[in-house]
Amino acid sequence: MTTPALLPLSGRRLPPLNLGASAFPHHRATLRLSEKFILLLILSAFITLCFGAFFFLPDSSKHKRFDLGLEDVLIPHVDTSKGGKNLGGFLIHGQGHDEHRHREEEERLRNKIRADHEKALEEAKEKLKKSRDEIQAEIQTEKNKVVQELKRKDSKPLPPVPLPNLIGINSGEPADPDIREKRNKVKEMMKHAWDNYRQYGWGHNELKPIARKGHTTNIFGNSQMGATIVDALDTLYIMGLHDEFREGQEWIDKNLDFSVNSEVSVFEVNIRFIGGLLAAYYLSGQEVFKIKAVQLAGKLLPAFNTPTGIPWAMVNLKSGVGRNWGWASAGSSILAEFGTLHMEFVHLSYLTGDPVYYNKVMHIRKLLQKMDRPNGLYPNYLNPRTGRWGQHHTSVGGLGDSFYEYLLKAWLMSDKMDTEARKMYDDAIEAIEKHLIRKSNGGLTFIGEWKNGHLERKMGHLTCFAGGMFALGADGSRDDKAGHYLQLGAEIAHTCHESYDRTALKLGPEAFKFDGGVEAVAVRQNEKYYILRPEVIETYWYMWRFTHDPKYRQWGWEATQAIDKYCRVSGGFSGVKDVYSSSPTYDDVQQSFFLAETLKYLYLLFSNDDLLPLDNWVFNTEAHPLPVLHLANTTLSGNPAYR
């Protein structure tokens, strides 16, 4: 079985088309001039210029001319009686100036041109003696010099900013030896994933653990941006794998380059790269991560150059040209993409003092607030040219999910001062509960999808994050409904655990139905795969933090054992194509989010609550922890909530 073309590749995110490189051919001219011929043309032009200068210089015996030395051209006026003209307070020398000096100067200039001409000819002869490879090497050397100079200019220091109070980045050791052993097992799995990526995929975006080579997808363009390195850094740090962390830092410092001719997903690059770099900066204090995050953010800004300010899905990092996915409702932008920028962009403005990032995401929010919402629901598609909704499809899974998550987390990250975001979250959750959340005949609570005026009774693995979101947002909810939303989170966690428990591998499928007698089970073959996703484990962790019910650690340990048994291969970890088969085939991809999210949430599940406490840290949708910005520290004044 082949992986479906529309494959959601990470966290809460859209399903991008999995197009091969052949879908975007790089058209090249069929006839190319050789480097020697180009070089010869340049040298010929230079020689012609030299001859022109030599033969057509004006002759001082026929024309009056000014001396080119500044000391002779502009002389402050003192006396007009010595043969010069007074013009505007300055003397300009007349014919009384020494013409012999002009002739000597002219002869010196002629000799210089003749010498330069002869030197150019000699250099041309030497160049033409060299092989094609030698000439190409020289051209590459010059290009590298230019690139290094540009990098040096881009690496200017950012203004100093007081760091928020960072609590709980080096703790969490459980006292219980059984829990400590489980935590150490997760750490060993992280080491296995990282070491194999280090050996077989270093610098590539991801790893093919069976083929033992690098892997990439169209969300990263055609460049080697080291997505796994950036995505894994904070996980390495909190696990105490500091040697591996330093390896990653060194690669980023020397090799992470955003001036590449590559078209990338704005959303994926934001949550994985900018989120990962910012988290690594806050945890370690290393300036290189902040500098790289700001450099990359500047490359994403052209994506916002649309008639509405709603960004394109993709942008070319070099040219700044943006466009949307061809399959997305007549060229629409996607709610879970343009709605999942707020956390990272607010931190960028905080760290740089530049409000441009904050203003971009607040503009999106203001536009959404003005729009009509069918049944109070946000459709998944919005046209960036017209500002109108696309097809009325609403989902808390792929295409919609992290938009709702970021409304809640914008409020939390602002130290609960951004009440506007909290109101939008509460309004949205009420509409979701009314129109999308149902109980199956067997008593399982699920979140369906609204399509074409009716509810589709299907839930995706991606949607399982919502159990944790409901628990996280319970405190502060309207009408004292904290207990209600905590219970709703527990019910979603139970349903998603059932989707795992009803498979042969004890790993959950990509999507599962609630039709007739079929409950929490995948029906279609192309929905039976598991690609190392984190959402179910994420909900277990949040539910553990808020309830300390031991069943969540038990469920997390079941998932840990299943991943280690069925997804582990000698070259890393791979997704599987059918969780209902006791002998599944592998998809041969070790996703970067497996290291960023799945293993991080498992490690936190078996750690004490003082490791990254939720009062001080908010996790982005790729599980990168960003600190709460308390009012005393924030410089953001555009939103009345921050004033």
Image (cartoon, rainbow, N blue to C red):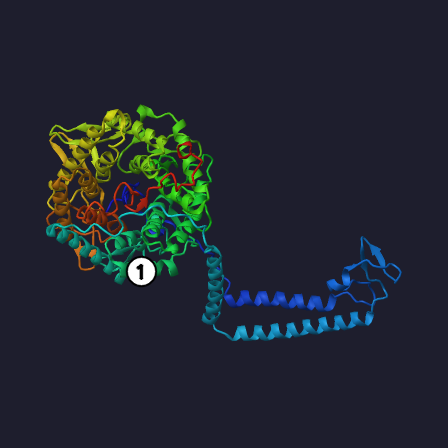
Q: Position of residue 263 (x, y in %)?
A: 40, 49
Q: Is residue 368 above or below residue 585?
A: above
Left or right, 306 with respect to 76, comes to left
Question: Which of the 4 image quarters holds residue 406?
Answer: top left
Q: Position of residue 520 (x, y in %)?
A: 15, 36
User: Who is closer to the viewer here, 338 or 277?
Assistant: 277
**How many C-alpha atoms fall within 10 Å of the one at disc 1: few (<14), some, or many (≥20)?**
some
Q: Element under label 1?
A: helix
Of 40 and 254, which appears nearest the observer?
A: 254
* Residue found farthest to the front: 632
- Residue 187: x and y in percent read 19, 55
Residue 594 in view (yes/no): yes
In the picture as drawn, the residue positioned furthest to the right comes out as 81
338 vs 3, nearest the viewer: 338
**Residue marked by disc 1:** 246
106 relative to 575, above or below: below
Where is residue 349, by image quadrant?
top left
In the image, 397: left or right of 583?
right
Q: Tell how many labels.
A: 1
- Residue 298's x, y, as percent? 44, 48
The foreground one among 597 and 205 is 597
Quarter of the figure that contains the C terminus: top left
Mark 1 is on which residue type?
Answer: Arg
Query: Does residue 30 appear in this view?
Result: no
